[in-house]
Amino acid sequence: MNDSTLRIVWIYPDLLSTYGDRGNMLILAHRAAARGIPVETYEVRSDMQMPTSADIYLIGGGEDGPQALAAQRLITDGGLHRAVNQGASVLAICAGYQLFGHSFFAKGTKCAGLGLLDIFSDRGETRAVGELRGDIDPRLGLPPLTGFENHGGRTHLGQHAAPLARVTGGIGNDGQTEGAWAGKVIGTYSHGPALARNPAIADLLLRWSTGADRLAPLDDSWPERLRGERLAAATPA
Ligand code: GLN
């Protein structure tokens, strides 16, 4: 490893990794290596100390029990807080997204989150299950979001977090907005895995973490076919 090596951490694969979320790490590593960026990936299980000096942290979705346990361990560990405060980039999916906020509900109990995104989550009357699509915040300059959602929680944003997208199909946070971002932290309800369906978000994370203004284009004809199919499959909101 040298100083230019991009270090990617997959947080707690033993607790949070549903619907192919681990693919987000594979896609980031692939898209970095294809640009000649040296990359190392680390799978940090919940019985391990969280490294504080990685460049990108990824956390996935999961059921209520593992979600509550992951939040407790991350709060006790404190390493993820230090990493984010030092400027690391984050992609947090579903349960991982909810636990980045101030609080969330798991198995009917209100749980403390990490407070690294100005959001909180409660429960909806129905589960949100199915295709999700949305128009991403124009400030991020990205094409529409596509994903698969399956969650009972609903998420509300405070003034220090902006919606990642306006929903055009599915539920997301509340049927109107989907996900949140602040600084270099992105949270979303999109599984799928999210970065296979949204390679532009992978490249945004790579640009944030390397400081590059632009990255060499890749042949994305297969991801584009997938995106076209999945965006067409999402029911308009
Ligand atoms: N347990 C959370 C909920 O149901 C998150 C689910 C998930 O990560 N898919 O809202």
Image (cartoon, helix red, strand yellow):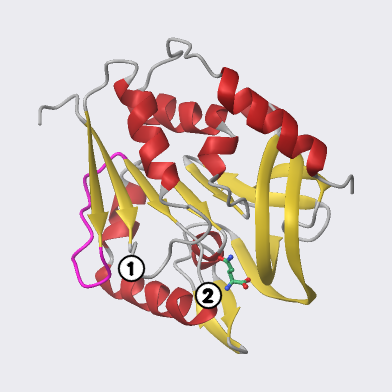
Tell whether 210 sits left or right of 181: left
| Residue type, label 1 | Asp
Which residue is depicted at the point 37% across and 39% down?
A: 26
- Ligand 1 falls in which quarter? bottom right
Residue 54 in the image, given as x and y percentages of width and height: 25, 43
The residue carrying mark 2 has its beta carbon less than 8 Å from ligand 1: yes
* Residue 206, placed above or below residue 13: above
Magenta stretch bounds? 45-55
Instruction: Confirm whether the magenta stretch covers residue 130.
Output: no
Instruction: Confirm whether the magenta stretch covers residue 47.
Output: yes
* Residue 85, placed above or below residue 224: below
Q: Residue furthest bottom?
A: 108
Name the residue carrying label 2.
63
Crowd tier of the residue under label 2, counting other residues whose Cα lies within 10 Å: few below 14, some 14–19, many 20 or above: some
Tell whether 67 sits left or right of 174: left
Name the residue carrying label 1.
14
